[in-house]
Image: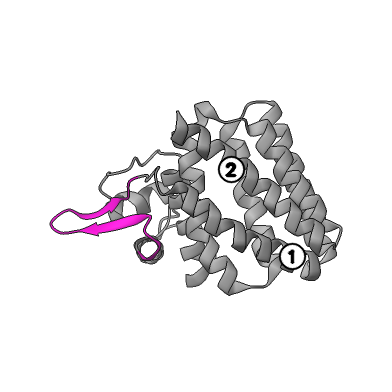
């Protein structure tokens, strides 16, 4: 971060935006297992890694406690929660309902720019998958979610689905050797194109196609 001696210090982001940036940064570190399950979470260390102040980092961590991604344990403080393989099919089943709701909402309410951005971002996922670049694939996946969630204009659905999305991302990183990101990218593209078409029924089918893919992936892990 710029020092106080900097002659042209940029205006800091507002409190809400800084917390969102902190949340996305910490989520990425946890989802990619750069901060492994069971690892103690030290606020000062995370603030340094994220390049942000401790206040937005603290807010982001509290959000993560509320959704179960980070746990508060006696005498240990905050630690990254474990990955519950047995529970993962329930996660996908619940997420399916919410993703259908979000996709149909986006099909009805997205602006022309949001529709274009959804398809363009999904196409970037396809290109990243073709190159075998998992980190880029996951970054575009997160970007796609941001656009879709803004477009649906349903904060209740978005708030409910976000913890499940993070759990799915972390599950993928933990067991990526069993996955096929090319198939996943095509499923995301099909959903994005359906939303962009303004066809609510097609958007719901696109969301189901994506959840079907995630369910097949999870079952391969659970049954192996």
Q: Is residue 158 left or right of residue 222?
A: right
Chain part drawn in magenta: 66-82
**Residue 12 shows in this picture:** no
Q: Position of residue 56 (x, y in %)?
A: 41, 65
Residue at 46% over, 58% down = 23
Residue tagged 2: 214
Q: Quadrant of residue 126?
A: top right
Q: Determine the residue located farthest toward the front in the rendered image.
A: 223
Magenta stretch contains residue 81: yes
Q: Which residue is outermost to the left? A: 75
Q: Position of residue 118 (x, y in %)?
A: 75, 53
| Observer-nearest of 98 and 131 | 98
Query: Quick check: 209 above or below 183?
Result: below
Placement of 31 over or under 66, stated as above or below: above
Is residue 143 something that shows in the picture? yes
Q: Is residue 37 left or right of residue 91?
A: left
**Residue at the image position 53 percent from the left and 59 percent from the top:** 94
Q: Label 2's element?
A: helix
Tag 1 residue: 104
Task: Indicate the secondary structure of the residue bearing disc 1.
Answer: helix
In-image side of 130 versus 37 (left or right): right
Look at 33% across and 55% down and name the residue there: 70
Q: Give x and y (percent) for residue 224.
A: 45, 28
* Residue visible at 25% across and 59% down in the picture: 72
Give the Cα separation between the discs numbered 2 and 1.
19 Å
């Amino acid at each position: 971060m710029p020092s106080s001696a900097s002659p042209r210090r940029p205006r800091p982001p507002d409190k809400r935006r800084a917390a969102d940036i902190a949340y996305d940064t910490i989520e990425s570190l946890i989802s990619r297992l750069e901060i492994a399950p069971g690892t103690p979470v030290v606020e000062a260390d995370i603030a340094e890694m994220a390049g942000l102040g401790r206040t937005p980092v603290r807010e982001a961590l509290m959000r993560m406690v509320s959704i179960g991604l980070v746990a508060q344990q006696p005498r240990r403080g905050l630690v990254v929660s474990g990955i519950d393989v047995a529970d993962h099919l329930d996660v996908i089943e619940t997420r399916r309902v919410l993703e259908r709701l979000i996709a149909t909402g986006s099909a009805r309410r997205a602006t022309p720019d949001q529709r274009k951005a959804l398809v363009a971002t999904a196409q970037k996922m396809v290109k990243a998958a073709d190159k075998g670049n998992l980190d880029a694939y996951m970054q575009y996946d997160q970007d796609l979610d941001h656009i879709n969630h803004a477009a649906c204009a349903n904060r209740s659905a978005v708030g409910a689905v976000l913890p499940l999305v993070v759990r799915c991302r972390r599950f993928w990183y933990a067991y990526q050797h069993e996955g096929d990101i090319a198939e996943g990218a095509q499923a995301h593209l099909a959903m994005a194109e359906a939303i962009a078409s303004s066809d609510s029924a097609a958007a719901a089918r696109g969301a189901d196609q994506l959840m079907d893919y995630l369910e097949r992936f999870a079952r391969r892990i659970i049954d192996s």
